[in-house]
Image: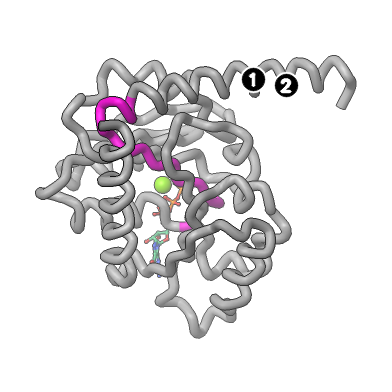
Amino acid sequence: MTKKEILVLEDLLGSNKKIAADIREKLSQKGILTVNLMSSPGAGKTTLLESIAEHLTPDHKMAVIEGDIETERDAERIRAKGIPAWQIITGGACHLEAKMVGKLLPEIPPDLDFLFIENVGNLVCPASYDLGENIRCVLLSTPEGDDKPKKYPKAFTTSDWLIITKTDLVPPVPFDIQRAIKEAQEVNPSLKTFTVSALKGKGVEELVGQLISALKKLRKDNA
Ligand SMILES: Nc1nc2c(ncn2[C@@H]2O[C@H](COP(=O)(O)OP(=O)(O)OP(=O)(O)O)[C@@H](O)[C@H]2O)c(=O)[nH]1
Ligand SMILES: [Mg+2]
């Protein structure tokens, strides 16, 4: 990368950070907890959101912003659960940016409890972009392999929570859950970890319990 390219990138990331901070401030003031989900393509982000929706509603109100390179498919899956969803189609970009989320802010109902943002499936680019979330989650599915935290560290170092998904596939998939957690915590000691099978609904209740605790804390901090 040339010096000029580095300066342009720094400028872009700096302006993204400012927009993200503004989004976080506005949503937090409204008492809305915002959660950014990042992972490789197909790790199970939308399936997890479908399962979370079953546990959270009707007691809590949630909405989802979906990010994909093409198609409205994930937003349609979420809407089929009776949850409001907006689809951002990036048309080739491998990550969401704060300005894309910011454009949707006027449409976000003020009485929401949770706003989930499903990032574009990619374990590299999304890690560099703050979207204004309160909690950043990285999902790692068992078929991807337990060695990924050290190979793709930025997604893990910048996240608050690690969610290991598709645990129902172990075995036959040779994924050592303890190794994955240990290596992820070596790159980021403050990572909180969860293991789930969204398809079987296993582990999702505990995750939802932590989301509700985080919502209460956010509201207390902003009271
Ligand atoms: N066995 C198993 N399969 C799962 C689980 N969660 C998701 N899947 C399957 O994994 C595939 C991808 O799931 P999605 O939820 O679409 O994954 P995604 O991360 O949203 O995918 P992109 O948005 O394209 O990046 C689907 O065929 C799901 O049925 C799980 O817990 N166990
Ligand atoms: Mg998806």
Residue at (32%, 40%) from the top-left corner?
Answer: 218
**Residue 94 figure quarter:** top right
Residue 179 in sight from this viewpoint: yes
Answer yes or no: do the residues labelled 2 and 1 have beta carbons within 8 Å?
yes
Q: Does the magenta stretch include residue 31?
A: yes
Q: In which quarter of the image is the N terminus?
A: top right
Q: Which percent across, then down, holds residue 176? A: 58, 79
Kindly identify which residue carries mark 1. Answer: 14
Disc 1 residue type? Gly
* Mark-to-mark CA distance, 2 and 1: 6 Å
Give the residue displayed 28% in from the left and 68% down from the top.
201
Vertical order, 139 against 223 (above or below): below
The quarter of the displayed image where residue 167 is located: bottom left
Q: Is mark 2 on a helix, strand or loop?
A: helix
The residue to which callout 2 is attached is: 10
Q: What stretch is highlighted in magenta?
A: 27-43
Q: Position of residue 56 (x, y in %)?
A: 19, 52
